[in-house]
Image (cartoon, rainbow, N blue to C red):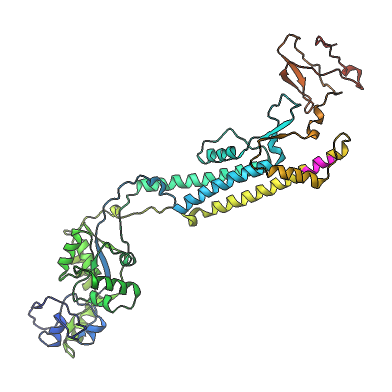
Amino acid sequence: MVGFEYRIELVPDGKYGAIDLETGEWNGIVRQLMDKRADLAVGSMTINYARESVIDFTKPFMNLGISILFKVPTSQQTRLFSFMNPLAMDIWLYVLSAYVLVSITMFVVARFSPYEWHNPHPCDIENETVENQFSLANSFWFTIGTLMQQGSDLNPKATSTRIVGGIWWFFTLIIISSYTANLAAFLTVERMITPIENAEDLASQTDIPYGTLDSGSTMTFFRDSMIETYKKMWRFMENRKPSVFVPTYDAGIKRVLEGNYAFLMESTMLDYTVQRDCNLTQIGGLLDSKGYGIATPMGSPWRDKISLAILEMQEKGEIQMLYDKWWKNTGDICTRNEKGKESKANSLDVDNIGGVFVVLLCGLAFAVIVAIFEFCYNSKKNALTEKRSPSTPQQSLCSEMGGEFCFALRCRGSRQRPALRRQCSKCLTGATYVPAILDIPPHHSQQHRRLNPTNGLTQTCPEETIVRAIENSTNETERYTVREDFEVT
């Protein structure tokens, strides 16, 4: 195409060519061209500023960049606490914090809400104490039982505590579902130990040495770079003992195969190497972008002719055909299983499931508001009841709320509290109405029936005084008398 005859000779020192900063002298192929002892330099000659200032280059016939050659990592050994990997560490801490917060909120809300205080002995309607099942210990037990999907025998009764329980159930549903789904991914994806993933990882550690080809363009790139990461890498390579620079590509590849060494080389040579050795792999992407060119002495008449020939071959696709022939020869390609490459399942962090924590906090805030409403409503109701009852001491609304509030703040108080007199006023003996004939057992029976004044139904209670005679009935057909022998007349 160009029309010339050639004779191939090897460079005496085997180097591509780099400048000595102390003497300012060049070596390798560049020195041969400067001294006009060679007419052309054909090979993986990288075009850069320093070389272009002393010799000429044709148009680039191949584009490339610097990349990292590393040995294929081994499979990761199973760790004892690998079951924690599906969730990031901050998520585990947030879940623990949410568990404590919800438990304490349930305890406080249950103490403030009057609807969580109930008679522990329903048969004894004259019992003077009421009980709250959500002690501090029971509150923690309720939340941990729900979180572990086991439930508990504690059931909230007030609206506010049910809101706390419901929002906690929703929270645990999302957390458990996310954990289970990501755990399956961690168990099915083959994890590989990859100590480095890019140049930044390489620069931030000192356990794995790394180097370049001695007196090559890659070494010049790191030496002259103004990027802080590459400057840091150059200082490491320059001061590392024994030397991390290798005389040839084969020596660098051999050192990588021996383990614990990363070789910084041009991507074209790296691609050629990893296609033929399944024990080698490329780490990260390209560190820069440049091209290969054919070097000539300054002012050579062959430069423009060869440049035109390169452009013509690129347009016809001949250079790409040659690349595929020599780089992707099916007889030499390593049959690398793409599924065998590193595939990492990422831990779920705040960016993935942080919204469920926001929902939880909003739900707890709403439950607290409802509990305050229940507290105020019940206090007002009790104050009005006392005003209407002449037999009970009169208290203002503020006094009523203050007393209830002081008791609720007694976090170390008992689960039981005295029942308010106004709540037991209906338990006093006196006239009442019976909607139906009482089925009273014989006198020798161990149990009798008692009328519950709150709902008009009878309850089975221990043997004691039976409901007295009904008086002042306006309907004669509804009047019944209970005699001492428990016969109904």
Identify the image quadrant of residue 284. Answer: bottom left
Residue at image x 55%, y 46%?
A: 100
The quadrant of the picture occupied by the N terminus is bottom left
Q: Is residue 409 left or right of residue 126?
A: left
230 or 250: nearer the viewer:
230
Residue 404 lies in the magenta-colored region: no
Identify the image quadrant of residue 419. Answer: top right
Magenta part, dominant SS: helix
Identify the image quadrant of residue 484. Answer: top right
Residue at image x 48%, y 45%?
A: 177
Q: Is residue 121 left or right of residue 321?
A: right
In the image, the segment drawn in magenta is 379-384
Q: Position of residue 305 (x, y in %)?
A: 19, 85
Residue 112 visible in the snapshot: no
Q: Position of residue 325 (x, y in %)?
A: 18, 66
Residue at image x 60%, y 40%?
A: 136
401 or 442: nearer the viewer:
401
Residue 387's place in the image compared with 332, above or below, is above
Residue 224's place in the image compared with 426, above or below, is below
